[in-house]
Image: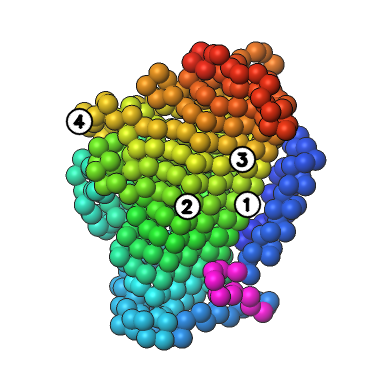
Amino acid sequence: MVETLPVGRFQFKRLVAAFLSSYRTLFILLWIVAFGSVFIWQRKIIGAGISVSVKTGLSRPMPKMRPFAFNLTDFGGVGDGKTLNTAAFERAILAISKLGKRGGGGQLNVPPGKWLTAPFNLTSHMTLFLAEDAEILGIQDEKQWPLMPPLPSYGYGREHHGPRYGSLIHGQNLKDVVITGDNGTINGQGQSWWKKFRQKLLNHTRGPLMQIMWSSDIVIANITLRDSPFWTFHPYDCKNVTVRNVTILAPVREAPNTDGIDPDSCEDVVIEDCYISVGDDAIAIKSGWDQYGIAYARPSRNILIRNLIVRSMVSAGISIGSEMSGGVSDVTIENLLVWSSRRAVRIKTATGRGGYVRHITYRNITFDNVRVGIVIKTDYNEHPDDDFDPKALPIVKDISFTGIHGQGVRVPVRIHGSEDIPIRNVTFRDMSVGLTYKKKHIFQCAFIQGRVIGTIFPAPCENLDRYNEEGQLVKRSTAQNITDIDYDI
């Protein structure tokens, strides 16, 4: 098993040392130094008007962010890693729920220690604060994980028909929820789940580490999330979600479907200043699956992803889809470093999905030791059942790539449209990628219409129009529908 890079409490010294030990180039080092300075500044901030700046010392006081604050130990919590604390969490959250909006809600402090628990539900107007060296541990006995109805936009549990397991930390129909701390940890202890999944011993879809549904004004900041049984953080049909200064870890192999953050039918999302190294997509933007997602009709839109370092040996750094039947639009991904990964950024869809992916901006993206840099795939043929509509064709258009750089890349671009699902209005500008594969046809295209502005490296496919730096047309492509895809490279 490949060991994930242990970044806790934003240990940039270890990260820089790891990069220095290999063949990283100067621009990568400068990128990380600049990015680290953003972390140092941002770690003082949790959300609008919420500060976690505290005095240094052996024992850090827990900042009071709400007018009423409680300690888990006040409700019988025992942080020995063995005592089950589910009832203590439930009693504490019940006390906060009784406060309502009065005075701005309540705060639950989780002191240093290991706090074993079964799944529990959050409440509105609440802050869950994990102290330094506090670790919430998910119980590994799946019998203590409640079953929930399948998500309406997926038709049934993602892996099995029927009910699905709930998440370790769960919330529905909430407003004003903050999960933060002094880099405390929420640990799903997913190892037993992964093993049982591989052995086909589970009868229901695995649950996420954290799932918040039909909610608004959610902030996740300054914590570490690790070893989720399934997707790590899954906001579902939420508005105004911020994820900042979060480290998400799982083994990069043999930890199936441990996506980092999966905004699903969400609106107004900011994900920034995070480190994610997991066993699937670091981030996957979704909006429902085939006919169920089309009927649910909730798009993901207005999403900003910036200042991230991500790694995915199995899937991609940042993905859109493949479950995108409600639509995905107005997404900006900028200042991203993808290292030691199978793919960097990917859009995936298929016949039967319907929906759209449009108005997507990639800006200042760095690849380091990535097999395939940019992927758009239109034949990701995984369906919830056989009742999908083959005439439901997704629309993929209005996508721009600017400032794409890197080294150690085998195939910089693979955009695979089709006669049924052509890719339209794609723009490349300011691209220079160092290659590990010197043969031809490494900028691969099929059924794509778009343009290249200025000079880029490697040379683009013949499907694209050529413009000079001033935006003047130099050569119009007459070969938009030719196919030059080679998956053997």
Picture coordinates of residue 434 (x, y %)? 72, 27
Look at the image and say whether residue 294 sits in the magenta stretch.
no
Q: Earlier in the sequence, mark 2 or mark 1?
A: 2
Q: Name the residue beneath numbered marker 1.
A: 307
Q: Which residue is mark 2?
A: 302
Element at label 4: loop
Please say if the residues under marks 4 and 3 sit with CB atoms less than 8 Å apart: no
Mark 2 vs mark 4, foreground winner is: 2
Q: Tell which tag, 2 or 1, sits nearer the viewer.
A: 2
Of tags 3 and 1, which is closer to the observer? 1
Would you say the residues marked 2 and 4 are in contact, meaning their CB atoms lie under 8 Å apart? Answer: no
Which quadrant of the structure image shows residue 233?
bottom left
Q: Residue shown at 37%/69% (left/top)?
A: 175
Q: Is residue 432 visible?
A: no
Q: Residue at x 58, y 60 (%)?
A: 245
Q: Are marks 2 and 3 in contact (CB under 8 Å)?
A: no
User: In this rendering, does residue 37 appear at all?
Assistant: yes
Q: Is residue 51 magenta?
A: yes
Magenta stretch: give its range: 45-55
- Three-letter residue code for mark 4: Asp
Of the numbered discs in the image, which one, if any, rests on residue 129?
none
Residue in front for this viewpoint, 5 or 84 = 5
